[in-house]
Amino acid sequence: MTNSETIWHALVNADVSKVAYNPCNKLNAVMQQVPENIKVLNITKESSGLGLCFGRSLANQRSAMFIQNTGLGNLITELYTMHKLYQAALPIFVSWRGHYQEPIEAQIIFGEKIESLLQAIEVEYQICETSSDLENLDQSVAECFSQNKVKVYLLSPQLWEQNSADYHVFGSPQLNGVETRTSGYSGQPALNRKGAIDVIMESVHDNDIVISQIGFPSKEVYNSKDRDRNFYMLGALGAATQVGIGFAMERPDDHVYVIDGDGAFFFNPNQLVDLAVYKPENLTVICLDNGSWGSTGNQPTLSSSGMNISSIVETLGIQNIAMTDSPDELKKLIAQQPQFLHYFIHAGNDKTGIEIPMRAVEIKQRFMNAITVNH
């Protein structure tokens, strides 16, 4: 087998069904050999790929990632607060730029420090410079999943005899026409976030999935109505919707609600791009918009100065959207299951509820047990 075939053989043997990929020309040789039974998720940002892969892991599906080594700098927080915190397995194959015959200075300064970085964040890694370094790859990838760990494989350009041509058809601009009709808003919301969450949790069905954003949203969902089919994000701001997308794509018979906020979408608008790209019909993203960073002291977000998230969503191509500040309308809309529900609330956090008393792994295991029983 070629080195590329060896990598794919290990992933196929480990039952990996999808890989998240951010382009690098040093990965062309391996991406030319993608097997028919593995689907490639083309990601716009490395941390977005982590969210999709983590959501798939909650649905008991296996993923891998292919990225450039500078991309490791873009995903450290998400790696720690999703895959390492919840102990979710993920092999990450990294083109090791700046290591071997590298002409670009910016790649060299980062590539020389990549081992120190991985050691500092306590992520196991394996250097792959020649075919002999790939001899144990089947066992190594299998251990990632059996031990629920993250492992980085540093792929030196020495593995490939020469640079390969791009494996895909070249892109060219083919733009959809866009007409937006989104309303503005200048009313007085009836509820704060806890009040809105109470309405949501009363309205979802017992078998529905609820994934909640970090901080007060997860705490308030727990105190409103804790249930086994709730998944509480404890870290990774701006990843809840990404996790919901990854999960929903693998569980088409379950309806998934993500309880998210305006701050998270301004922090990571890539989530909205992927929502428009993948469009899972069984996913409803509820944006609770208080114009504030609720978990950090209610400092104003961009929606306080007129930035309309619903308009952004519509421009990206999501048509099934709704906007309201009415509690009664919120109940009706939850039953209708739009793809994006923009609900206006006033700022303020619930100060009476307790913190979630479960550790991350307990949250994950309870959730996965619940969806397995009913699947």
Image (cartoon, rainbow, N blue to C red):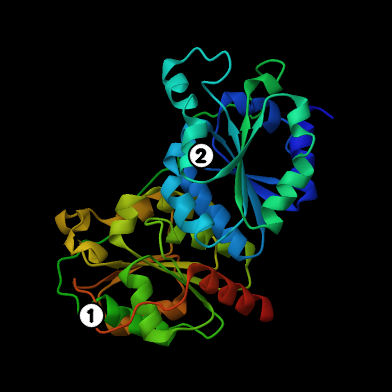
Q: CA distance from mark 1 to mark 2?
A: 39 Å
Q: Quick check: 173 left or right of 146?
A: left
Q: Residue at x 34, y 55 (%)?
A: 265
Place of residue 166 in the rendered image (x, y in percent of width and height, measured from the top left): 63, 24
Crowding near the residue tagged with mark 2, few <14, some 14–19, many ≥20 C-alpha atoms within 10 Å: some
Whether 164 is drawn above or below 39: the answer is above
Which type of secondary structure does the marked residue at label 2 adopt?
helix
Determine if residue 181 is in view: no
Kindly identify which numbered label has been placed on residue 351. Answer: 1
Q: Quadrant of the N terminus?
A: top right
x and y, in percent, of residue 355 in the image: 35, 77
> Which circle marks residue 7 in the picture?
none
Q: Neighbour class for label 1 at 10 Å: few (<14), some, many (≥20)?
A: few
Q: Position of residue 321 (x, y in %)?
A: 39, 64
Dividing the picture into quadrants, the one containing residue 216 is bottom left
Instruction: Give the residue type at disc 2.
Output: Leu
Amino acid type, residue under disc 1 in the picture = Lys
Which residue lies under the disc numbered 2?
118
**Quarter of the image holding residue 131?**
top right
Which residue is pictured at 62% across the width and 67% down the height? Answer: 252
Closest to the observer: 84 or 224? 84
Q: Is residue 9 above or below residue 110?
A: below
Q: How many marks?
A: 2
Is 350 located above or below residue 9 in the figure? below
Residue 164 or residue 150, whichever sits in front: 150
Q: Earlier in the sequence, mark 1 or mark 2?
A: 2
